[in-house]
Image (cartoon, helix red, strand yellow):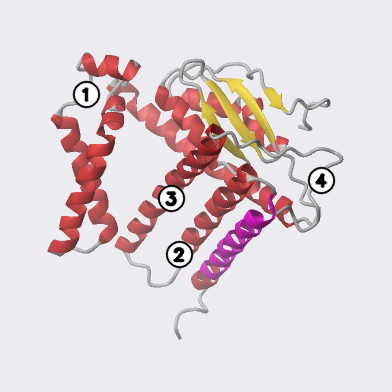
Amino acid sequence: MNGLDTPMAIVAIVLISAGLAFLVISVVGVLRLPDLYTRTHAVAKSETLGLILIFGGLFFVPGLTWDAAVRLVLVLGFSVLANPTAAHALVRAGRESGVEPWVSTDDVKPPPGGLT
Amino acid sequence: MPQQHSADQGRGPGLGPGSMAVEFVLMLAFWLAISGQYNVLFIAMGVVSAALVTWFTHRYVAANLGRHTPPSTIPLRWARSIAYVLWLLARIPPAGVLIAWVVLQPRLPVEPYVLRFTTHLESPVARTTLANSITLVPGTLTLDVDPDTREFTVHAFVPSAADDLVSGEMQNRIARLFLQDPAPPPEVVWEPAAEEVPRR
């Protein structure tokens, strides 16, 4: 009927859902991880994967026009370049203002539920 | 410094108005392709944006345009670039899953390390590619690159995330891209110095 039960649409739904799951996990990471650097890992990285999955899914959405597909590729390419650049700017700024990386030792494990 | 040198010699488009025009046209084309709106307001905003971006960045862009690229090597470099991008994209899902797995465990077994190594990559663009690739692949972040000593400082989420750097594989793949010879694995300094060198 609305085209949501075709194999293409199912692939799209699966990919987009997986992408959203990674975005949610990156938020969980930001909340749970101990310091600036590890949090940047979570936000920049799970997000990269989440974006790739969501955009991959959007390609399978029924009725995608040709010019929209080109635009999707351009936006994805831009995000994939901009994401690491922003992450680097963030951690470099942290490093230059003297933020010490959190270190895991055997006696200091992060408590369940993460550090605040 | 090498950039200024080559611009002074006038190799490639250099810093002249020609290179600015090229960049401006590319930026405007990107805007038009993305916006898909072809009325006066949107095109005017595109012109202003493209002009601003060109003004801010043409110094960096022009410095790297058309340097050290004999035309005969261009197809090879394109082929290797595409192969490299595919290799890099294939690294992202497993590493992303690893981070998700660490984050979701109640114990939160994150084991961050800072590692330093020196790269043999000669061109600034090659080192930028390495720095961006390190940050793009989940689990490693480029903290700093020393332009003089070529020393990279990298933050690793867990030690195994840095495997491709410790083995030198990523560096050597980028070296191929820039038609440079591969080098043996770099000497890596870990911080905090682990008594047992991090599990690999």
Whole-angstrom CA distance, mark 2 to mark 1, is 40 Å
Identify the residue under disc 4.
A109
Helix, strand or loop status at disc 1 = loop
From this view, report whether residue B156 is shown above or below residue A112: above
- Residue B175, x across and y down, in percent: 49, 23
Contact flag, marks 1 and 3 (Cβ < 8 Å): no
- Local packing at callout 3 (Cα closer than 10 Å; few below 14, some 14-19, many 20+) is some
Q: Amino acid at mark 3?
A: Ser
Contact flag, marks 2 and 1 (Cβ < 8 Å): no
User: What are the residue bounds of the magenta stretch?
Assistant: A12-33
Identify the residue under disc 2.
A58
Helix, strand or loop status at disc 2 = helix
Q: Amino acid at mark 2?
A: Leu
Please report, as a chain letter, where disc 4 is located: A
Query: At x 36% / y 60%, what residue is drawn?
Result: A69
Q: Does the magenta portion include A28?
A: yes
Contact flag, marks 2 and 4 (Cβ < 8 Å): no
Please report, as a chain letter, where disc 1 is located: B
Q: Which mark is residue B14?
A: 1
Please report, as a chain letter, where disc 2 is located: A
Quadrant containing the N terminus of chain B is top left
From this view, report whether residue B2 is shown above or below residue B39: above
Identify the residue under disc 3.
A79
Whole-angstrom CA distance, mark 1 to mark 4, is 54 Å
Please report, as a chain letter, where disc 3 is located: A
